[in-house]
Each structure stands twice: as structure tokens, then as C-alpha cells.
Amino acid sequence: MKIAIGADHAGYELKELLSKVITEIGHEIIDMGTGSSCSVDYPDYAESVAKAVSDGTYERGILICGTGIGMSIVANKFKNVRAALCNDLFTAKMSRLHNDANILCIGARVIGIGLAKEIVETWLNTPFEGNRHLKRLEKINFIERKVINSENEVIKRS
């Protein structure tokens, strides 16, 4: 699987470590920054990863910041992105089983390294269950299209 990964300064060290873990599991990692622990703005990195997942360049993405909240807010602005903030194993598993989450967001200042590794492994290894959950994802996609269409209508009127 091709996975895009990105982090801000708060998530830099965890990103570096998780990149190695993911590569060892056998997946291809594309690092979209940041390249150090110097202060940066998380929206820039969330945008890069979310765009790449949204347009299908990469199958999944992982975003890491201090809490994971900022990254998840930005990522979920993109069409076809289902970013899930997961700071425990249960939400990591359920985000894949029921929601087919394609971007995992983690809070580096919220969880430890050991748990972060387990969350990533669980998230990568859990398939989407489909069935009754597929109908719900279709409803999410319908809502997304309605919002985009209404925004385009407002722009046309301006």
C-alpha cells in the first residue's frame, strides 16, 4: 500500500519513527514533511497529505500533530477524505471497519510511542467491513456533493 505521511513540529519525531515501522511492515511511505522539529503550521502538511489521498495518488494517509485535532479538521475539508482522529486501538479499528477511514490522525502529545505503533498497525490491518456501513458512506458522499453544489451556487450568484 502507498501511504502519505505528514506532521507538524509536534509530530515530527513520531512521524519519523512510524515511517520506519510502516516500511518494515511492507508498505511504501511517502514523507510529505515536516523535516524537523522547528515550528511550522500544521494546515500546510494536512493539506498536502489530504490532497494526495483525495485525488487517489495515495491509498491512505497518516497525519500527526500535537493533538491530532487540527490535522483532522483540515483533512476532512477534502472530497473523498474520511480522516479519523484515533488515540486508542478501538477507534482505530472501528474507523476502518465501519467508516473506511483513509486518513489516520494521531496526537503525538496525547499518546506514547508504543500505543502509536499499535494504532497504526491496527488501522493498516483492519479492512472495511462494507455491508450496512456502505449505505452510510454513500450518504456521507451525497451530503458532500450537496455541500459542494450549494457552495458553487453561492459562488455563481456572487
Image (tube, rainbow, N blue to C red):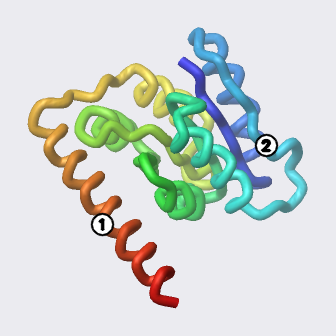
- Residue 39, quarter of the rendered image: bottom right
- What residue is drawn where x is 33% and y is 37%? 100
Contact flag, marks 1 and 2 (Cβ < 8 Å): no
Residue drawn at the location 26% of the way across and 33% of the way down? 97
**Front residue of this view, candidates 109 and 40:** 40
* Above or below, comparing residue 69 to residue 92 in the picture: below
The residue under label 1 is 146
Q: Residues within 10 Å of mark 2 (few under 14, many from 20)?
A: many
Image disc number at residue 38:
none
Front: mark 1 or 2: 1
Q: Where is residue 141? Give x, y as percent.
A: 29, 52
Q: Residue at 41% of width from left, 43% of height from top?
A: 88
The disc, 1 or 2, on the residue closer to the chain's N-terminal end is: 2
Q: CA separation, marks 1 and 2?
A: 33 Å
For label 1, the crowd category at 10 Å Cα-Cα, with few meaning under 14, some 14 to 19 and many 20 or more, is: few
Q: Quadrant of residue 29?
A: top right
